[in-house]
Image: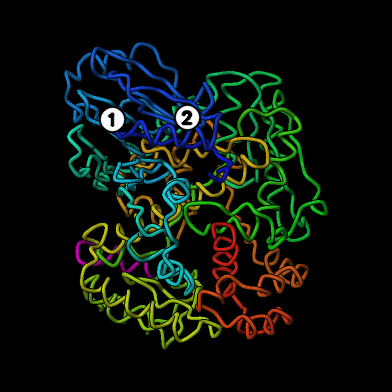
Amino acid sequence: MTSHGAPYFFALPDREEAGAVARRLQDASPGLRTIDHPSGRPWLIGLWADEDIAVTRAGDDAIALIGTLPRLGDELSRWAGKLDGRADQLVGLSMSLPGSYHVMGSVGGTLYAQGTAYGVRRIHHARLNGCLVVGDRAVALADLTGAEVDITAVALRLPEPLGAQLPERPMWRGVTAVAPGSYLTASATGAPPRHVRWHRPPAPTRPMAAGAAAVRTALVAAVEARTHRGGLISADLSGGLDSTSLCSIAAGRLGEGEMIACSIPGDESVWDDAVYARRAAAAWPHVEHVELAYEDTPLFYSGLLDDGCRTDIPGGVAMSRARSTALISLMAERGSRLHMTGHGGDHLFFHTGPHYHHLLTRRPLLALQRLRGYRTLYGWRWKDLLRQLADRRSYNSALSRISTEASGTLEFTSPGLTWIRQPVVQPWLTPECRDLVTRELRLAARNARPYAPTMGRHLELSALYIGTQECAAIAEAGLRAGVPVTMPYLDDAVIDAALSVRVEDRATPWEYKPLLKEAMRGILPEECRVRTTKVEGTVDAVGGLYRHRDEVGALWQDSALAKAGLIDAAALARLCETPGTPALKDGAVDSTIICEAWLRAVS
């Protein structure tokens, strides 16, 4: 088997034929660790650190937690003691303990496998010689079973941002995904596995005060789950609200020599992030603050031709792996055991208006007032805004209207109060690629279901589900650079707390991330908490495309996407010779770069 970089595991049913799979895995990778079912047959096989797993047994039942674990007393033993051979009794365990981890069970001979509610940690399954194999990483299952890449799944990720808007599908044929918020059970009889829903997002009913208190409690517990083991940790300190909030919580819990806050100042003639990062760091004299010089920071598109893209999906980090891991590599040299980032904060606390499409029918005056504010903020045209507000089509009807013969825009100047945006359909996509996408859109229009009844909640969950997969790819890149990466905002309890707050309290054009600001009152340095400026990184991306245009152009030599019939590589190579061309504006080439790098890595 191919090495997978990040820790991973497989889980096998409590059956005789699982022994052959276990032997095959051990022969291919002799360093794998194994934990047995209570019966003595192999149960869990993979790579993990001692601090990332906790196992307890009670008679014929066993529980394993794998991931970022909180301080555990006798909690697992109590759960194991009350299972009494019923796997469904494991539902609720993860919501009773902070952290981010898989819940695995061997309960009366039944295999139980549960990821996190919103998809940071996932469950997939496939079959090898008729035996069910469950795993946390689709790429590892694909390698084990010899599954072929689903070229249609790749094609759907080329028009931007279509792949992020459609129902999720694995990137390999023969690999099945368990949806976030569902668990898998497999009996010892060999019956097909069952997927059962165990979590539903909370209704947005909490007022601001109660919601902010819940977010605060969940975030503090999430950071505690990362810091309670002691040792040196590092954390991003960009100067923005997300990372500075996490650093503030951690700094309040750690002593001298236990934390390094690290920043990339950027171009200080344009950005003021560095100013706020230094102001925050000054409030924590016991925390070391390290800055990486702007001129030493890789630009976007650096390192495109490395082999670090063996991930479950084509991840956006492929465009910026060298940049994203520059600080992490430095922290690896310093001996950091864990690196904390603010990824996920935007998903929870930054909103641009779609919630008000539904709220218009319940609180019309408030909705119109807020939408007018968003229109002013982003330059929306009244004609576009009113047309979208009047559009009450269903999700499936909206899907049926998407065309590969037209092209949309990624700019905020379009209101985006629609179930699905018309994607950017790049001119270098082949007719065959467009046909594949069109066919799948028609199937989706007939069969797909939204994640929620309202447009705003559906779009929110859709962004979360794809965002957690993207963050898993970032974590993989960080581990390859030498330090495990962790993202407290994406813990289930934190997400639930944020989603439980009333839309009108957390989505407003008048204030940036009001819910997080209120939650961090008294923890975050006040001048950072009330900051009103916001950095935007497009300039760096444009500069990177110019600086690394030869590296980008080299991707289209012997292109994997071209071999699959999805792009016209010669046409794209010509465009990349002049990065300023309108065809490449707004990152139109990014999804093609990402898919090319990924397809090369997994093929």
Q: Amino acid at mark 2?
A: Thr
Q: Secondary structure at mark 2?
A: strand
Q: Which residues are magenta?
A: 360-371
The crowding category of the residue bearing disc 1, from other C-alpha atoms within 10 Å (few below 14, some 14 to 19, many at least 20), is few
Task: Say which of 45 and 462 sits in front.
Answer: 45
Q: Position of residue 133 (x, y in %)?
A: 34, 41
Q: In the figure, is residue 10 to the left or right of 13? A: right
Q: Position of residue 6 (x, y in %)?
A: 55, 39
The quadrant holding residue 290 is: top right
Q: In the figure, is residue 213 to the left or right of 267? A: left
Instruction: Let me know if residue 150 appears in the view.
Output: yes
The crowding category of the residue bearing disc 2, from other C-alpha atoms within 10 Å (few below 14, some 14 to 19, many at least 20), is some
Q: Is residue 418 inside the magenta stretch?
A: no
Q: Residue at x 24, y 45 (%)?
A: 200
Give the residue pinned by disc 2.
68
Q: Amino acid at mark 1?
A: Glu
Q: Position of residue 262 (x, y in %)?
A: 70, 38
Residue 405: which disc? none
Q: Position of residue 316 (x, y in %)?
A: 56, 59
Q: In the figure, is residue 248 to the left or right of 26? A: right
Residue 16: which disc? 1
